[in-house]
Amino acid sequence: MDASNYRRVPVGVVAPRDADDVAAALALCAEAGVPVVPRGGGTSIAGQATGTGVVLDLTRHMDALLAVDPAARTAVVQPGLVLDRLRDAVRPHGLTFGPDPSTHSRCTLGGMIGNNACGAHSVAWGTTADNVAELAVTAYGGTAHRLARGWAGAPAGLRELVEGNLAVLRTGMSGGFSRRISGYGGLDALLPERGADPARAFCGSEGTLGVVTEAVVRLVELPAAPVLVVLGYADEGAAADAAAGLLPHRPLTVEGMAEDLVRSPAGLPRGGAWLFVEMPDEGAARALLRGADALDAALVTDPAAQRALWRLREDAAGTATRMPDGTMAWPGWEDCAVPPARLGGYLREFRALLAAHGLRGTPYGHFGEGCVHVRIDFDLVTREGVARFRTFSEELADLVAAHGGSLSGEHGDGQARAELLGRMYGPEVIALFAAYKDVWDPAGGMNPGILVRPARLDENLRFAVLPRTPFAGEVATCVGVAKCRSTETGGAGVMCPSYRATGEERHSTRGRARLLHEMLAGETITGGWRSPEVAEALDLCLGCKGCRSDCPVGVDVAAYKAEFLHRHWAGRLRPVSHYVLGGLPGWLRLITALRATRAVNAAARRIPLPGLARERALPPLAPVPFTRWWRGRGRAGGPAVGGAPAVAPAVTPAVTPAVTPAVTPAVTVTLWPDTFSEYLAPEAGRAAVRVLEAAGLAVAVPARPVCCGLTYVSTGRLDRARTVLRRTLDAVGEVPGPVLVLEPSCAAALRTDLPALLPDDPRAHRLAAAVRTFAETLEEYAPHWTPPRLDRPVAGQTHCHQHAVLGDAADRRLRERAGLSGDLSGGCCGLAGNFGFEPGHHAVSVACAEEQLLPSLRAAAPGTAVLADGFSCRTQIAQLSEGHRARHLAELLAEAL
């Protein structure tokens, strides 16, 4: 599968290391009569990156930037090079590669050449074909070609084909515009008056002619200080009508979105639709504003604010896959294009066509070039739904052709639209396409069924093989946009740490979802829930939940892993780590009850525990658990709720203490004694009590042991988790106010896993709704409290579950009010609860920490406070960094008090 609705099962995958490997593979496959499909990032949305023969994965090894010539403004690249790596490398020279699809963090140059990709800046810098100077191509059978202007290096017979069809090329492909990508849309580049450019003509061939092994690409000058102008219009039609009129201002981009795609219009000017227009400088931007007839407008010069607004647009490919009611929408008609002057009329008719078929979609896209992206809530499962998909597709193809448009505006036709090319081009052009294909590939071995002699648009649908179960429906929501394959660092994003560590597709969010898809299909993976292939791929999933928030469609591999482990080990003896680490709350409660803490700590230092990684030392148990301290605090004379703590905290002299007014506690906060704060880090709980009371809040602690079930969920012991959670609900009873959970992973489990595992228990939903983080509690229930000023820089780790489930906006605001400056690391610390303690995980665990966390600690200035609210994060920092002790935010504030 790729990012489309299609699925074709190959016989094998080859990851060539160089052009010689490519030639050898193509020769062997030609000798055996086996088809070949070249593949980059697999982000194609029309099915062209799938195949039934041998797939060449060009991302594993052929991903180098071979040379950059800043003076000539060219670069030499291999096909598996990710676009962002090229852009990062040439940015210091003030250059960039012009085409920039929204998948720029994971799409490859080879894939861009195959699809003739465009992106937001093609208004100024053109398509990929406009930016390719030379191509090294290997044909089916192993013959190598070097393509540039002129006929040298072209396959035999190509010049004769062109000279014999000049009239067809000049008339049948006339009336073109910048986004005419469909079919072999660049074939007219071979005309003599256009310079006979086989390299340009090859772009957009979707792997049907040969395999690109190297490319010389042109670079463009990067504007020093581009300015974003956001124009608001009454509706989508008005925005589309206005787009063409902005082109004389020579914008870099003209992007359009309507309100049905923007869930939160914060930061956008008034209107029901918007044009995002990027100009090269502020002067040009203000001139555009004077000439634009918009309802409202905003001029954005701040780069961070620009990035935030562009993120709305870039994430639309995923956001558009979910309708407002949560149902899925699918690709297939993702990027039709019409001449920009006709865009408004086309969109109105397109909306009417959707309504006539009872379908919904949210158009957006490159309005300045008339290219419209949309995902539609097709029913691709039932016979009736697939028939409607076909009928709609045929009628839409006719509508696009009537407006002089192109069925594909940048993503290629693949299987989704190639069958309908005859509605756009006449029969003579279609025949010429077939002859062009045969010149390059007379044996028909390159990506058959795509573009020429195409497969039907309603066959090979990936949903047909799945059973009708809720879990299958969840797995199928992975649409393959592959944001999980991004290797960019920095920022708050988490997904997908194991893929970043290994670089293997099976360890990406998409790879795991697709393996589960195949497991449920039962054709290529036949072991069902006992499948060793799926177990191996899921083994390196850290359960960080980053995909839950960072995946545009919310694929939740941590939840899928728990369900898989639950069924995989049903009725069997589990790995020892599932009992040791999965049952951690029970073991720690037993050790404490037996007063065996000191003996266990001593034994753990000397005797390795079975089933655990030998590379790691176990964190010691605290001599006094939090709840024992809490009860003793009451007996020592301090009240069980409110009052001064029995153990005076240390005072840091270099801070300014808060001025805390004397108030009568009005709100009682239930402080949750999670397993980590109870047995391993009670200092966080004691500090939280100190701060909460200083803020004028009363504190209560459950009288009986409670557990969020996290360790049982992460090891797939779901029945045990349900039992533990029911016992917790019985112990807690009705909670009258907020429940403060200091450990982010436990708070996330109570908010999400608890109601998911006990959906019919109203107590589960009430408790989940009551859960708050430390910062949320203070912000919501003590809004007038002034925290102490620490006035120090911070470094450390935002817990991945906090990023994915809870959010850290309140934490950022609290840190700012306390004078803690700087950002915490994104990504995942790599320890991830039980993951880093399990055998075979240590190398990946360390690699995850080395991506962002450990470098940030090494770069921290003296006096920097190291902050990590998660116990796993603090443990990882203690074990892998030198001289750093991380603390919970509650500890820093308590010390300042």
Image (cartoon, helix red, strand yellow):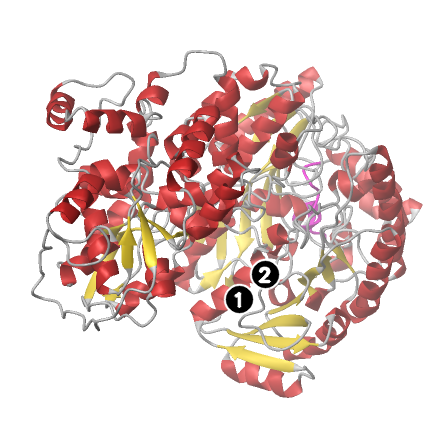
Q: Position of residue 499 (x, y in %)?
A: 44, 36
Q: Position of residue 525 (x, y in %)?
A: 60, 18
- Relative to residue 559, is residue 274 depicted above or below? below
- Which residue in the structure is indicated by mark 2? 313
Residue at 86% from the left image edge and 42% from the top image edge: 388
Q: Position of residue 177 (x, y in %)?
A: 77, 62
Q: Main secondary structure of the magenta part?
A: loop
Residue at 75% from the left image edge and 75% from the top image edge: 238
Which residue appears farthest toward the bottom when viewing the image?
A: 290
Report if residue 344 lies within the magenta region. no
Range covered by the magenta-colored residues: 196-208
Crowding at mark 2 (Cα within 10 Å: few <14, some 14-19, many 20+): many
- Report the amino acid beneath label 1: Leu
- Relative to residue 43, is residue 314 depicted above or below? below
Crowding at mark 1 (Cα within 10 Å: few <14, some 14-19, many 20+): some
Q: Is residue 396 left or right of residue 766?
A: right
Residue 309 is tagged as 1
Residue at 44% from the left image edge and 28% from the top image edge: 723
Image quarter for residue 215? top right
Along the viewing direction, whichever of 718 and 13 lies nearer the viewer: 718
Residue 16 shows up from this direction: no
Residue 892 shows up from this direction: yes
Residue 644 is tagged as none
Residue at 32% from the left image edge and 62% from the top image edge: 778
- Report the amino acid beneath label 2: Arg
Image quarter for residue 193? bottom right
Which image quarter is the C terminus in? bottom left
Asked if labels 2 and 1 touch by Cβ distance under 8 angstroms, the answer is yes
Which image quarter is the N terminus in? top right
Report if residue 201 lies within the magenta region. yes
Separation of marks 1 and 2 at Cα, in angstroms: 7 Å
Q: Secondary structure under badge 1?
A: helix
